[in-house]
Amino acid sequence: MSIQVKELAFVFYPVTDVARARSFYEGLLGLKVGFQIEFAPGQWWIEYDIAGQALAISNAMPGKTASALALEVADLDAALTAVKAAGADIANEVMEFPPCRMFIVKDPDGNEITLHHRKAS
């Protein structure tokens, strides 16, 4: 017997300071909230809708920092400029590969996010 996976439920990143995390995800990355709930005073679960998939952040669930998320951006050079202007921590400078370019930025809690751009074919 095997498990029948229906769909990707969400990608989860733990955060400690929700206001600081929201500034990063909503302000710098420009993500839009799809769903949010305050479980208890100051304990949040927030989901950002990214092309029909959910990126969840929460200070109400335990977890270790992660590096599982790659986001496709329209302009990698503009993204790099914005990240540097915001003073965000760049974990890896721009890497070049035949089909794409990417770099890795850390959110305020150290979760790594790859910002990725496919080259024209």
Image: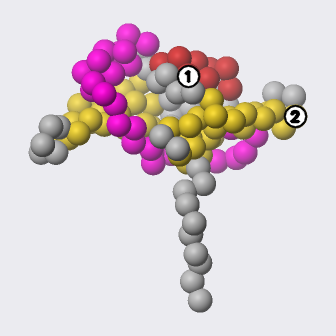
- Residue 96 in view: no
The residue sitting at the right extreme is 40
Question: In the rendered structure, does residue 35 fall within the stretch colored magenta?
Answer: no
The picture places residue 68, in percent across and down from the top left corner, at: 45, 48
Q: Nearer the viewer, residue 120 or 1?
A: 120
Q: Residue furthest bottom?
A: 1
Residue ID at (50%, 38%): 50
Which circle, 2 or 1, is nearer the viewer? 1
| Three-letter residue code for mark 1 | Glu
Secondary structure beneath label 2: strand
| Residue at x 64% of width, y 47% of height | 63
Answer yes or no: do the residues labelled 2 and 1 have beta carbons within 8 Å?
A: no
Determine whether, in the image, residue 22 is placed left or right of residue 104: right
Instruction: Give the distance between the C-alpha atoms of the residues marked 2 and 1, in whole angstroms.
Output: 22 Å
Neighbourhood count class around disc 2 (C-alpha, 10 Å): few under 14, some 14–19, many 20 upward: few
Q: How many marks?
A: 2
Asked whether 74 falls inside the magenta stretch, the response is yes
Q: Nearer the viewer, residue 75 or 13?
A: 75
Amino acid residing under circle 2: Ala
Judging by the rendered image, the residue that carries numbered circle 2 is 40
Relative to 78, 24 lies left or right: right
Quarter of the rendering occupied by the C terminus:
top left
Q: Residue shown at 38%/19% (left/top)?
A: 83
- Tell me the residue that label 1 is attached to: 26
Residue at the top extreme of this rendering: 85
